[in-house]
Amino acid sequence: VQQLEAAAEQMKSKKNKTAAEGLKEEADTIRSEVPEDAWGSLDNFKAKAEEYRSGATSYTVRNKNIPVKTTNTTLSGLDLPRVALPDYSDWGDTLQWIRKENIPGSFPYTGGVFPFKRQDELPVRMFAGEGSAERTNKRYHFLSKDQDFNRLSVAFDSPSLYGNDPQERLDIFGKVCESGVSISTVDEMEKLFEGFDLCAPNTSVSKTINGNYWWHLAAFFNVAIRQQVKKFEEENGREPDEKEHAGIKARTLSTVRGTVQADQLKESMGQNTLVFNLDTALRMMGDVAEFYVDNEVRNHYFVSISGYHIAEAGANPISQAALTLSNGLTYVELFNSRGLDANKFLRNFSWFFSNGMDPEYAVIGRVCRRIWAIAMRDMYGVDERGQKLKYHIQSSGRSLHAQEYTWNDYRTTLQALYALADNANSLHTNSRDEAFGTPTEDTVRDAVAIQLILSKEYGWLQNENPLQGSHVADWLTDSVEEEILKIFEEMHRRGGVLGALEVNYQRNRIQDESMIYEHRKHSGELPIIGVNTFEEGVDNSLSVEEFDIEVTRSDKEERMMVIDRNKAFKDTHAKEAEEGLARLKQVAREGGNLFEVMMDIVEHCTVGQVTQALFETGGKFRRNM
């Protein structure tokens, strides 16, 4: 059409009226055959490009107009575009770019789910948890110091992850307060967030827990409600009545921000902290989704569909993306089968990926955004918000090495650059000493500095879509997408995600890819600097005899303090706990919503008590062999 119309204009200028009219008629005929949305897309793109070149624009988030500058001025005086757009002369090239890439914030969201990054809130979210609630709370205040936003991320200890109370039992005692914080009562949860207003717009909390996450989620909500009730009492000099308390609860649930991981399918193939049998676990996920929809929980994500642990177990970046996306699609089917509206529950989906050194990691976000957006629009007909895949990403733990461990900071910096260039919504940069222990305050500060330097100082990232227009990024994006779709087809032939799980397809794939990585690392075919190449003449690995590096560890006194507090809580709430657990088991047998009950009984029941009660009604997880 473009060429015919240009030729018609040329004939017109040459006074060849007959030829001009014939060309124009042919152009009009072809134009009418082109879908109307194609012309609309071109017109919208042209208008948006002119707007971006003007230096200022605005966009709308939840009915709020957000004005933004579209350029950043360099020290040399250049106005660097925050979002650089192509300037093709051919309409077909422009339309192809729109359909595959488009402006960030526009379908299919390849370049990002928002038009611009927030300049008042950096994507820093650091994973932390060690020892008692008080000690981890101190670490949170350290991480939040001088930050405008409190983006907290909770690591729980093993007993908490598996639904056990802290106790002196030999197989549990040594894990209490190790590699995470011990949280077994709502009172401990309250101590964890002392000094943070969980309903403040600048505070959000991510909770990394899966197998028995329902208790921890209910405890978190109840602590947020406690805070707001306390605020009411301070302002009014009295306790709220029943109606006022219900209003406080409703406002809290609609306001509190954060995420809980809660990905049961990932547990069955990657991380292995599945506690209940998979049917019970998926039923509980549905109960939580239903609770969110019924109670208008709009700002808190009830699942973080996670590829990180799949990658840490050994999967390559393509398999990580494919297995994670397929799990997300399975959850959509699961919640749809309960009669829930996808436009409502999809607003509470979030995602979590690993970032490594492989080239495919450079495009993992953009590939997943595009696949998800197309599937949600074309297969499920959901609205714009449900089409947007928003994700957190963390630098790879598997890429950290104890040999020459200070060099881990270089690896983490490069992985962070991948993530920020690909428009990740939040980012955790690992500390260099996580190769052998929980990070210290000094190494955590250095890890945060990696992000701050990249975001604040590194000039390339003052542009927010640096991958768009890159030939190698385009090739990688298309190639990775194609391989992901092949894996989808392989799982489809095995009966989908659940059918593939029955025959161990996912676990076998992860194990095979892990073996390839380990073999090539140990043979030297995969060079790792300081590990299998560029090594010193002497053994540079850490040893017990010469281990003088500061590490963070819990001691017996701290563990016993946590255990004693758990016992005291159970003694204080014994009667209410007995009644609550009986109610929970009854609702479980009757098929009611278990999370509704959990919200009520968590004030009196420990995580261990709830886990045991659900074992009696739903059964423990047993892996197929």
Image (tube, rainbow, N blue to C red):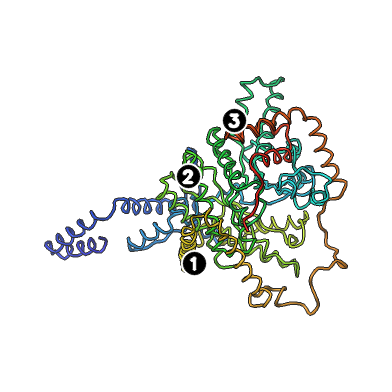
Q: Position of residue 203 (x, y in %)?
A: 65, 41
Amino acid marked by disc 1: Leu
Q: Position of residue 183 (x, y in %)?
A: 74, 42
Crowd around label 3: few <14 · some 14–19 · many ≥20 (10 Å): some
- Would residue 79 be visible to someone looking at this image? no
Which residue is farthest left?
18
Asked if 33 appears above or below 349 in the picture, the reply is below
Q: Residue at x 18, y 63 (%)?
A: 13
Q: Which residue is mark 3?
A: 251
Among the 4 quarters of the image, the one containing residue 574: top right
Alpha-carbon distance for marks 1 and 3? 45 Å
Quadrant of the rendered image containing residue 302: top right
Q: Nearer the viewer, residue 537 or 584?
A: 584
In the figure, is residue 462 to the left or right of 609? Answer: left
Q: Label 2 amino acid? A: Arg
State left or right for residue 446 relative to residue 587: right
Residue 476 numbered mark, or none: 1
Pointer 2 local density, CA inside 10 Å: few below 14, some 14–19, many at least 20: some
Q: Check residue 187 in the rendering and tell me which mark sits there, or answer none.
A: none
Q: CA distance from mark 2 to mark 3?
A: 22 Å
Q: Secondary structure at mark 1?
A: helix
Residue 417 x/y as whole percent = 60, 62
Q: Please, what secondary structure does the residue beneath circle 3 have?
A: helix
Sequence-earlier tag: 1 or 3: 3
Q: On the image, numbered disc 2 is attached to which residue?
A: 385
Label 1 crowding class (10 Å Cα cut-off): few <14, some 14-19, many 20+? some
Q: Quadrant of residue 407?
A: bottom right
Q: Which is more toward the observer, 201 or 136?
A: 136
